[in-house]
Image (cartoon, rainbow, N blue to C red):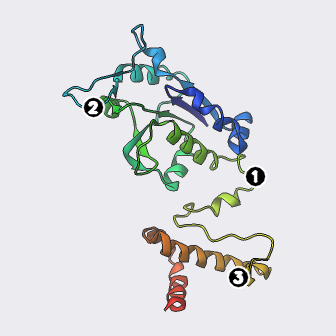
Amino acid sequence: MRIDVLTLFPEMFSGPMSASLLGKAIANAILDIHYTNPREFTEDVHQKVDDTPYGGGPGMVMKCDALFAAVESLREVNSLSRVVLMSPRGRPLTQALVKEWSQTEDMVLICGRYEGFDERISQGLVTDEVSIGDYVLSGGELAAMVIIDALSRMLPGVIGDFESVTTDSFYDGILGAPQYTRPAEFRGMEVPEVLLSGNHALIERYRRKEALRVTRERRPELLEHCRAEDAALLNEIDQEEH
């Protein structure tokens, strides 16, 4: 998968993109990441990519001319079928969206700075606007790194055992079940006996039930993604808690 990142600060990516599984994915050519600086497509001596907003107001706004030129310069190497703008007003990034995007061969991620973007970038250049949360960052670079990392986990060959991905929180819409490892007892806290039983059917049922329990406690709105067969487990949880 090829990802082209438009950023004024490509040096921000050097550490995260070279470490751990993400670094291995890039080294093994599973992920192909390229960086384009919009300043290279400006026509003034100062390489100015921002200007004051029409109508007045605080801050500076990223201009559309350099960004359009930067994206269009990628036509020979990127299909430009998915051009994503990091934006606090974008739709929330979800695991379902990550799964969908991981099926594409390439994409462009646009990282903003300053007070925002000229609206014509949204109208005439991008296909998607996405937000990683209800807060504001200094720029889109960190959000782009989050997206790249999430996408990498969906690509064959990045995670050694892909089954570990399918048990992640949100993979099938709800939170993941609690996990335990050695020792079996620590400071009076014991691993649930069912996990030591060796009975895989019971273990699978327990994990699904506990995933539903923690989802109902912490993110109840996610229960809309439940399977039909989860109704019996949710009923058991109700009886245990009342």
Q: Secondary structure at mark 2?
A: loop
Asked if disc 3 and disc 2 are in contact, CB closer than 8 Å, the reply is no
Horizontal side of residue 170 vs 153, given as left or right: left
Residue 121 spot, x, y in % from top left:
34, 30
Residue 47 spot, x, y in % from top left:
43, 14
Estimate how packed mark 3 is, as few (under 14), some (14 to 19) or many (20 or more) residues with alpha carbons within 10 Å. few
What is the C-alpha distance between the residues marked 2 and 1? Answer: 49 Å
What is the C-alpha distance between the residues marked 3 and 2? Answer: 60 Å
Q: Viewer-nearest of labels 2 and 1?
A: 2
Q: Secondary structure at mark 3?
A: helix
* Relative to 184, residue 10 above or below: above
* Relative to 56, residue 86 above or below: below
The single residue placed furthest to the left in the displayed view is: 55
Asked if disc 3 and disc 1 are in contact, CB closer than 8 Å, the reply is no
Q: Viewer-nearest of labels 3 and 2?
A: 2
Residue indicated by mark 1: 160
